[in-house]
Image (cartoon, grey):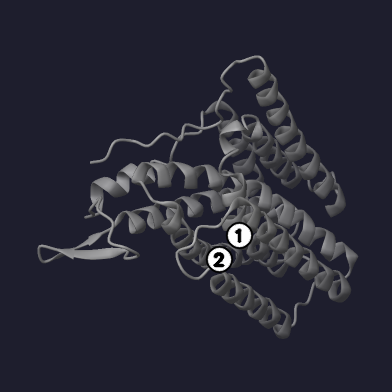
């Protein structure tokens, strides 16, 4: 661990900024209006701008090296969070959640993710502080995860069918309600099933993304603040990319390469030291290459009159 000293007021500033941004977002998106893609794109730019501004604060107070760690962790978490978007598509399609209600589910899901990731980061930092050798375990986990991501075709989370089998629920929606009372018993609505599936799967994703963040920084403040801004912009990013996600066929390989890089960096730390700015460059190049090659391949197939290959299966499953 480094000797970075984070004053209590810096944590308070982060909490205040987080609450302010969430409040502004909720106020701007009140009601049942569905966001247009252009409006969501504006919000995505604003979320990225907020992350950059906070990075400026980190640079001004903690120095350029810590700011590089922040931006590397932010870019890493932002890239890996795209995998969550595929899950959103699958869950919403399977449960028939309309667009007007998807925003509400994602809002609560993001709030829950901020809490659970904070817990994971605190635990990870405590373990690293006591047993620094755990970095090799984290590194091995990331390399194994990267290999599995390459070998396995990404499919919808198994948590969703498990919840449908074990959670008393009804396929009928009841407005904005997450639970309803039917025949004297409380039942979950599709909104609650979707929320639980998203929350639980985010926990699984965090088991990969949090160790990956520790590959570029061991400072809880840096990792959590980067997570905060990466997660807060997920809902707007989902609306922007929802129509294009199926065409990003090579993104899985890019994410796998990023995880492998983070794992290798941890395993080789005693012999090879890479600056955070190098990590930023590697992540940006890998993800950018995966996206560009996916778009080029899709456009080439469409010009040739061939149906593009989908990155993920997103068709809804039959109801119970």
Instruction: Determine the residue positioned at 77% across, 61% down.
Output: 70
> Front-most of 267 and 256?
256
16 relative position to 27: left or right: right
Residue 14, placed above or below residue 97: below
178 relative position to 208: left or right: left
Residue 158, placed above or below residue 216: above
Give the residue at mark 2: 114
Crowding at dot 2, Cα within 10 Å, few <14 / some 14-19 / many 20+, comes out as: some
Badge 2 marks a residue whose secondary structure is helix
Looking at the figure, which quarter contains the N terminus? bottom right
Disc 1 to disc 2: CB gap under 8 Å: yes
Residue 8, placed above or below residue 206: below
Q: In terms of image quadrants, where is residue 11?
A: bottom right
Q: How many labels does the image show?
A: 2
Give the residue at mark 1: 231
Return the disc, 1 or 2, that comes first in the chain's sequence: 2
Crowding at dot 1, Cα within 10 Å, few <14 / some 14-19 / many 20+, comes out as: many
Residue 170, placed above or below residue 156: below
Instruction: Determine the residue positioned at 70% across, 84% down.
Output: 8
Instruction: Determine the residue positioned at 61% across, 45% down.
Output: 241
> Front-most of 97 and 139?
97
- The residue lying furthest to the bottom in this view is 9
Q: In terms of image quadrants, where is residue 47?
A: bottom right
The location of residue 311, given as percent across then percent down, is: 56, 30
> Front-most of 306 and 218?
306
153 relative position to 43: left or right: left
Q: In terms of image quadrants, where is residue 101?
A: bottom left
The location of residue 287, given as percent across then percent down, is: 73, 39
Looking at the figure, which quarter contains the C terminus? top left
The location of residue 148, given as percent across then percent down, is: 56, 32
Badge 1 marks a residue whose secondary structure is helix
Instruction: Determine the residue positioned at 58% across, 38% down.
Output: 245
């Amino acid at each position: 661990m480094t000797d970075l000293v984070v004053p209590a007021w810096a944590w308070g500033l982060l909490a205040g900024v987080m609450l302010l941004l969430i409040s502004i977002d909720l106020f701007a998106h009140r009601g049942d209006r569905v966001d247009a893609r252009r409006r969501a794109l504006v919000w995505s730019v604003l979320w990225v701008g907020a992350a950059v501004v906070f990075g400026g604060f980190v640079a001004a107070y903690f120095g350029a090296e810590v700011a590089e760690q922040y931006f590397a962790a932010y870019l890493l978490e932002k890239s890996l969070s795209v995998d969550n978007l595929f899950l959103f598509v699958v869950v919403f399609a399977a449960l028939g959640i309309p667009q007007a209600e998807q925003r509400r589910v994602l809002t609560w899901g993001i709030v829950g993710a901020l809490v659970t990731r904070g817990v994971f980061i605190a635990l990870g930092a405590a373990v690293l502080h006591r047993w620094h050798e755990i970095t090799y375990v984290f590194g091995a986990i990331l390399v194994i995860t990267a290999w599995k991501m390459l070998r396995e075709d990404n499919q919808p989370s198994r948590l969703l069918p498990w919840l449908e089998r074990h959670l008393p629920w009804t396929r009928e929606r009841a407005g904005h309600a997450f639970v309803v009372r039917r025949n004297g018993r409380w039942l979950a609505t599709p909104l609650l099933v979707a929320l639980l599936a998203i929350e639980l799967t985010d926990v699984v994703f965090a088991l990969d993304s949090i160790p990956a963040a520790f590959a570029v920084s061991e400072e809880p403040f840096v990792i959590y603040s980067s997570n905060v801004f990466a997660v807060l912009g997920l809902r707007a990013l989902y609306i922007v990319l929802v129509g294009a996600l199926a065409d990003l066929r090579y993104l899985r390989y890019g994410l796998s390469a990023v995880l492998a890089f983070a794992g290798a960096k941890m395993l080789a730390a005693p012999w090879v030291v890479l600056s955070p700015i190098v990590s930023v460059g590697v992540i940006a190049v890998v993800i950018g290459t995966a996206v560009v090659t996916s778009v080029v391949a899709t456009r080439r197939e469409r010009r040739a009159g061939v149906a593009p290959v989908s990155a993920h299966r997103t068709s809804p499953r039959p109801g119970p």
